[in-house]
Image: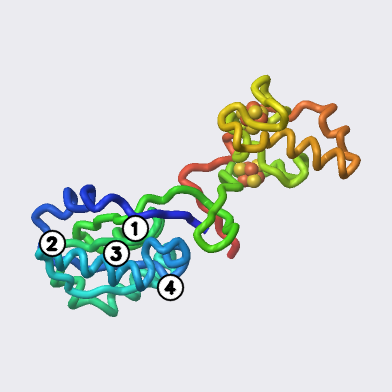
Amino acid sequence: MIISRQKDKEDLLRHLEGKHKVFLVGCGACATVCKSGGEEEVSQMQEWLVSTGREVTGSVVIDEACHIMRAGRDLRHNRSAVGEADALMVMTCGAGIQSISSHTEKRVIGALDSLFLGNVRRLGQYEEKCSLCGDCILNETAGICPVTNCAKGLLNGPCGGMEEGKCESDRDLDCAWMLIYERLSRQGRKGVFARVVPAKDWGHRHQPGRHKIR
Ligand code: SF4
Ligand code: SF4
């Protein structure tokens, strides 16, 4: 899930300058779970926009705003309210914002910051576990990602800053390599440390990414 949070209202006001009529877009997937752009937050945003003297011409919460065709369909269903607006304010991750902007020439104002691909610990607590490097080495690191969980992204064991299992970047955090070592030990796989993981081939991380399965 993409973890997102709302931008400061001050920042939004700057982008709203000269825009008096706004159409609001939320996302029924990640932004709803993050409480940054679901039905409730869209309604709160509407109240705030009205309190600043603006008119909200309409709103829609798209099932998954990153679904480009679905986003286009939902905007078409709201054609007249979108047409009346000076700008669309989009409360989705960056992928959703770009779905919307691909369907309109109007000014699109992104209301959220996308933070990271996150796992849900429990509602409201999210943890970054994967940085989408395109060349997964979890099979060799006992299922713990050093690219993401090690502050330095080291691939071959801990740096010299590790102390009593804690990371030098933040002593409240476990050193990722300590966790990997302990789990490999429990699995009887410490031998994995005998070989050197070559430098990561970042060429596997195609940008911009494209992937077709049919
Ligand atoms: S190695 Fe880490 S960052 Fe790369 S794909 Fe695997 S989990 Fe994600
Ligand atoms: S202490 Fe461990 S987790 Fe922290 S930067 Fe060094 S190797 Fe990475």
Q: Residue 171 at x, y = what percent?
A: 60, 32
**Secondary structure type for disc 3:** loop
Q: Is residue 10 above or below residue 27?
A: above
- For discs 3 and 1, the disc positioned in front in the rendered view: 1
Q: Are marks 3 and 1 in contact (CB under 8 Å)?
A: no
Q: Are marks 2 and 1 in contact (CB under 8 Å)?
A: no
Q: Residue at x 59, y 42 (%)?
A: 133
- Relative side of 212 to 66, left or right: right
- Relative side of 139 to 214, left or right: right
What is the quadrant of residue 46 in the picture?
bottom left
Residue labelled with disc 4: 63
Q: Residue at x 39, y 54 (%)?
A: 5
Precedes in sequence: disc 2 or disc 1: 2
* Mark 2 neighbour class, 10 Å CA radius: few under 14, some 14 to 19, many 20 or more: few
Precedes in sequence: disc 3 or disc 1: 1
Mark 4 to mark 2: distance in Å? Answer: 28 Å
Extreme-right residue of the structure? 188
Residue type at mark 2?
Answer: Thr
* Mark 1 neighbour class, 10 Å CA radius: few under 14, some 14 to 19, many 20 or more: many
Q: Is residue 143 above or below residue 28?
A: above
Residue labelled with disc 1: 97
- For discs 2 and 1, the disc positioned in front in the rendered view: 2
Quadrant containing the C terminus is bottom right
